[in-house]
């Protein structure tokens, strides 16, 4: 049953519409709800999507605001570590569902959006118009909302290289190669390579699993020799990234070449890579970047990958998305009725734009030296 967030009250209710119910959208929704804003979050996909990748999260909360502490505890479980995307999403989604000020609507595609002097709104594929005092784009690197913020620069661009992501359950490793439950090594370990960065990580258990259940061994490596392949398979169109490569899409010859490279790597990363190649669970992600010129247009603003797309070598994208949500919450605390909405989002842009531009630019040296557009 859809929550009635537009009840008649003596005081006008502050409202927001968020496009995208992935991590950035959920964090932004929770941050806004903390300030009393009634939020509708829409997403074109269903609720039960899965993601097996690991994200490096910062669990430190000392001296932070109430909203930042809440979000960091939700995404990290209170510690700095590598967490499964699906575990983070599960905790955030559960928190959003508990909050009476948040209305989550999955399987709802946005076909149009706009704004006027009084409100911003989306039109869905079901023919419904959802209005709010502000509209937040949290719809990822292929953001639809970004076109309304920066029509001159609507797309993230291909950086000239890609990342291969592999993982396996530690239970599938020979016992002598398992890190063990007392593993206290680095959350992410970079191992020697003559042809680009390669990382290994021990990814925390799936949300809701027991202490006895296994973690995952993750391995990521960058490859600047596949641009022709990506364009041939339609993953990259010109300089625009269209989609990632799943294992079933990857040609046999490419898998054999990757297996040959991985056979020289140290354990347990060698086993993780070879397992993913053999089982075709390997994922190939074209690396893209987006340096924003602006984050706001009137009542519409961007957060997360819709706002900024850094090279993964920065290891900052997710934690900066969390800071987007924190800043957004801080900026709406005085209200978003009428012109207050314009002022609040202008303040949000002033707090975040320079920081996220610097973050993306900090990773571009690697793209310029390693990537070959």
Image (cartoon, helix red, strand yellow):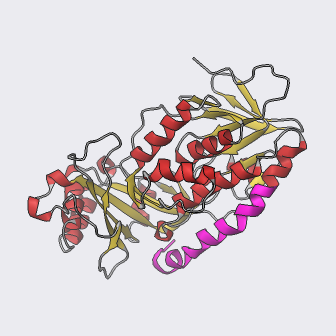
- Residue 320 position, x and y percent, is 58, 60
In the rendered image, the vertical position of residue 332 relative to residue 265, given as above or below: above
Q: Is residue 112 left or right of residue 62?
A: right
Q: Is residue 302 left or right of residue 72?
A: right
Which sits in the foreground, 237 or 183? Answer: 183
Residue 357 magenta-drawn?
yes
Furthest toward the top, the residue is 1
Which sits in the foreground, 35 or 50? Answer: 35
- Residue 228 position, x and y percent, is 42, 64
Q: Main secondary structure of the magenta part?
A: helix
Magenta stretch, residue numbers: 347-373
Which residue is pictured at 50% across the width and 42% down the height?
92
In the rendered image, the vertical position of residue 236 relative to residue 105, given as above or below: below
Residue 208 seen in the figure: yes
Residue 151 seen in the figure: no
Residue 349 magenta-drawn?
yes
Q: Quadrant of residue 115?
A: top right
Furthest toward the front, the residue is 63
Which residue is pictured at 35% across the width and 68% down the height?
188
Which quadrant does the N terminus fall into?
top right
Which residue is pictured at 55% across the width and 49% down the height?
71
- Residue 97 position, x and y percent, is 53, 31
Q: Is residue 114 left or right of residue 240?
A: right
Q: Quadrant of residue 103?
A: top right
Which sits in the foreground, 217 or 214? Answer: 214
């Amino acid at each position: 049953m859809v929550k009635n967030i537009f009840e008649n009250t003596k005081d006008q209710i502050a409202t927001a519409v968020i496009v995208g119910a992935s991590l950035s959208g959920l964090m932004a929704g929770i941050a806004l709800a903390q300030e009393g804003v009634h939020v509708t979050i829409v997403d074109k996909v269903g609720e039960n999507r899965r993601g097996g990748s690991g994200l490096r999260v910062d669990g430190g909360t000392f001296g932070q605001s109430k909203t930042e502490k809440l979000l960091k505890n939700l995404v990290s479980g209170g510690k700095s570590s590598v967490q499964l995307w699906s575990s983070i999403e599960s905790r955030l989604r559960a928190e959003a569902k508990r909050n009476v000020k948040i209305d989550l609507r999955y399987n709802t595609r946005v076909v149009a959006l706009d704004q006027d002097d009084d409100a911003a709104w989306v039109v869905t594929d079901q023919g419904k118009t959802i209005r709010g005092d502000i509209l937040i784009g949290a719809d990822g690197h292929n953001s639809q909302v970004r076109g309304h913020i920066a029509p001159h620069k609507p797309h993230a661009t291909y950086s000239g290289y890609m990342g291969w992501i592999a993982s396996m359950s530690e239970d599938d490793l020979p016992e002598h190669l398992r890190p063990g439950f007392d593993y206290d090594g680095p959350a992410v370990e970079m191992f020697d390579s003559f042809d680009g960065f390669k990382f290994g990580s021990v990814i925390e258990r799936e949300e809701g699993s027991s202490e006895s259940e296994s973690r995952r061994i993750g391995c990521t490596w960058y490859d600047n020799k596949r641009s022709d392949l990506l364009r041939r398979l339609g993953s990259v169109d010109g300089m625009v990234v269209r989609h990632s490569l799943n294992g079933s899409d990857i040609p046999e010859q490419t898998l054999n070449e990757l297996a040959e490279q991985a056979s020289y790597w140290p354990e347990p990363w060698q086993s993780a890579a070879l397992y993913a190649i053999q089982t075709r669970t390997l994922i190939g992600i074209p690396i893209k970047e987006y340096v924003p010129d602006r984050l706001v247009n009137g009542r519409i603003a961007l957060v997360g990958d819709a706002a900024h797309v850094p090279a993964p070598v920065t290891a900052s994208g997710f934690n900066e998305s969390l800071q987007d949500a924190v800043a957004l919450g801080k900026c709406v605390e005085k209200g978003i009725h009428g012109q207050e909405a314009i002022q609040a989002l202008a303040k949000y842009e002033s707090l975040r734009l320079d920081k996220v531009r610097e973050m993306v630019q900090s990773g571009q040296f690697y793209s310029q030296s390693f990537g070959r557009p």
